[in-house]
Amino acid sequence: MAQTVQSALFFSLGLGTMLTLASNHWLLAWMGIEINTLALIPLMVQNPHPRAVEAATKYFFAQAVASALLLFATLSNSYLTGTWNIPLISHPAPSTLCILALAMKVGLAPLHTWLPEVMQALTLRTALILSTWQKLAPLYLMYQIPLANPDLFLALGLLSIIVGGLGGFNQVQLRKILAYSSIAHLGWMVLVLSISPPLTLLALYTYLLISSSLFLSLMFLRTTHISSLSTAWAKVPALTAILPFILLSLGGLPPLTGFAPKWLIMSEMIKENLILIAVIAILSSLLSLYFYLRIFYTATLTTPPNNPPGTLPWRLQPQYNTLIPALTTTATIALLPLTPTILTYLTW
């Protein structure tokens, strides 16, 4: 019975996203986002822990406020322009309200405060869904909205990069660190959305790939805290050796896959003569790189504690299929040479 309910919830997640992606009408797109939200909440409280219930309540209220604001904006646009078509939202006030509502949906700064608190209380699998799949529908709608004032995207993107970098300092919970990492990467996507949408798609696909690889690795290691990474070598030694490369790719260091979108976004910003914003964004990304390196140091460079062999974690058989993590990890590390080909397909 539990498997049947779980399959129905995952089907609803896919159905909601597909409904939004296939919609040209605001009401259908709004319904798809609501189906997504209502399907994720039971997955959050699958383990009925008080913190999980609290996280689900916070998520519900944040999403309800954003949904109400989005519905109000689309009704206002229908009243002012007489149309429900997504690409034809032309009035500046409803357009701005829609973007702010969708920014709250995905967790862009300054509407991000619910995301780290919710992510910290979830299981790694649910946190993976929240930080990847749940971003697709709102970002697609932001991609579709014609914006009268591109400075709004620049402000939201730059503020998210700064907040994502500063928020990860002094954090020891890996899920909270990954929540701030998600905010920073969303900032990179939105920063270039009004200038070059194909680069936003490239940054989104790269983030989905690297984030999935990192979450799956942490699920294999069964760890949610930085301190427990120091003994991860006793569980899965090969994965512990590869984990730093995934973190450095997430930070955007060459010659790893994560370097490509940041490099191309910086080039595009400089071409548009937005040099100051580009400099601030790249300096703020160094803050994110700091806590990735902190996890890197804890995972591999810290001398393991002198524990007796009996107190170390056992090397148990993995509970998950190893094929998908192997593919995502390889792509996370080695896709940089294929960047021109991928970008060519995205610009068609």
Image: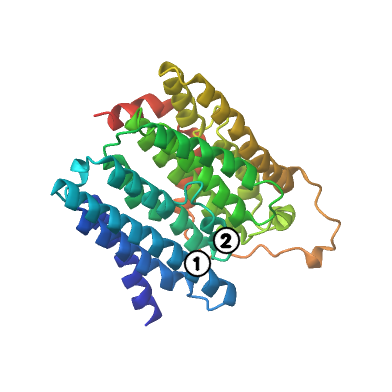
Whether residue 208 is situated above or below residue 346 in the rendered picture: below
Q: Residue furthest left?
A: 82
Name the N-terminal-most of marks 1 and 2. 1
Q: Where does residue 313 sit, x and y in percent of width and height?
A: 72, 64
Residue corresponding to mark 1: 58
Please tell me whether mark 2 sits on a helix, a strand or a loop: helix
> Relative to 234, is 259 on the left or the right?
left
Q: How many marks?
A: 2
Q: Amino acid at mark 1?
A: Lys
Q: Nearer the viewer, residue 323 or 25?
A: 25
Report the quarter where the N terminus lies: bottom left
> Relative to 251, is 91 on the left or the right?
left
Q: Nearer the viewer, residue 226 or 106?
A: 106
Q: Amino acid at mark 2?
A: Glu
Badge 1 vs badge 2, beta-carbon distance below 8 Å = yes
Q: Where does residue 222 sit, x and y in percent of width and height?
A: 61, 62
Q: Where does residue 120 sit, x and y in percent of width and height?
A: 59, 61
Residue corresponding to mark 2: 117
